[in-house]
Image: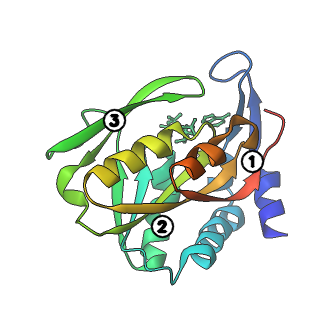
């Protein structure tokens, strides 16, 4: 019931940001307290007690779900950011998106050897964002085996891409037929 409710709240915008893309707009979930708080509760239920030491969230929409989840789970939050935003020394990784290319960066000293990191984002499409984030975190000695999302677009193959990298993904709802 809750996941169905969250799915019903997501608004769809055709042809944004490019013709042919069906944009699943998670800001409509943020605007609805019941939907937003239910997302965090479902993610806590899924991941509490699994021994995670940090949550990493990708700019920008991953911050919106990753940061409140980190507070609820009593662990730190590490932002994975777009280029030239982080002030300390970083490592960088470029990747392909459903609608373009981008680069992500993380502070070198944000991850300690053996940290068990949970990756959180609003939406899984091709999996490029999470694959690049996992590569950065693993290069710093962190372990990544799980990634959590509000929305999955299964036709874009992200789940399979992440599974091939030994990352198990979970999403609250799915939109097929992209
Ligand atoms: O699975 P993928 O194909 O990588 O796509 C999913 C990513 O795309 C969106 O972010 P976007 O880069 O558009 O940035 P934003 O969060 O700043 O809007 C979304 O928030 C995910 O991070
Ligand atoms: N179809 C889509 N809707 C919303 N965010 C996205 N990020 C990548 N693909 C997306």
Q: Secondary structure at mark 2?
A: helix
Residue picked out by circle 3: 93
Farthest residue toward the left? Answer: 89
First reached walking from the N terminus: tag 3 or tag 1: 1
Neighbor class of circle 2 (other Cα within 10 Å; few <14, some 14-19, many 20+) is some
Residue picked out by circle 1: 10
Residue picked out by circle 2: 68
Q: Which mark is residue 92?
A: none
Residues 97 and 2: in front is 97
Q: Is residue 171 left or right of residue 94?
A: right
Percent position (x, y) of residue 124? Answer: 62, 45
First reached walking from the N terminus: tag 2 or tag 1: 1
Percent position (x, y) of residue 141? Answer: 27, 59
* Marks 2,1: beta carbons within 8 A: no
- C-alpha separation, residue under disc 2 versus residue under disc 1: 19 Å
- C-alpha separation, residue under disc 3 versus residue under disc 1: 30 Å
Name above or below for residue 102 compared with residue 88: above
């Amino acid at each position: 019931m809750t996941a169905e409710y969250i799915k019903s709240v997501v608004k769809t915008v055709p042809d944004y940001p490019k013709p042919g893309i069906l944009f699943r707009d998670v800001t409509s979930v943020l605007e609805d307290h019941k939907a937003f708080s239910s997302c965090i509760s479902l993610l806590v239920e899924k991941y509490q007690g699994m021994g995670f030491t940090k949550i990493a969230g990708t700019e920008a929409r991953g911050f919106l779900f990753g940061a409140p989840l980190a507070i609820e789970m009593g662990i730190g939050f590490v932002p994975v950011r777009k280029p030239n935003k982080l002030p300390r020394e970083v490592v960088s990784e470029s990747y392909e998106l459903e609608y373009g290319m981008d680069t992500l960066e993380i502070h070198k000293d944000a991850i300690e050897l053996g940290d068990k990191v949970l990756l959180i984002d609003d939406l899984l499409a091709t999996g490029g964002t999470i694959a690049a984030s996992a590569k950065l975190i693993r290069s710093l000695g962190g372990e990544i085996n799980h990634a959590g999302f509000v929305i999955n677009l299964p036709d874009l193959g992200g789940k399979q891409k992440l599974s091939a990298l030994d990352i198990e993904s979970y999403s609250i709802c799915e939109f097929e037929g992209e």
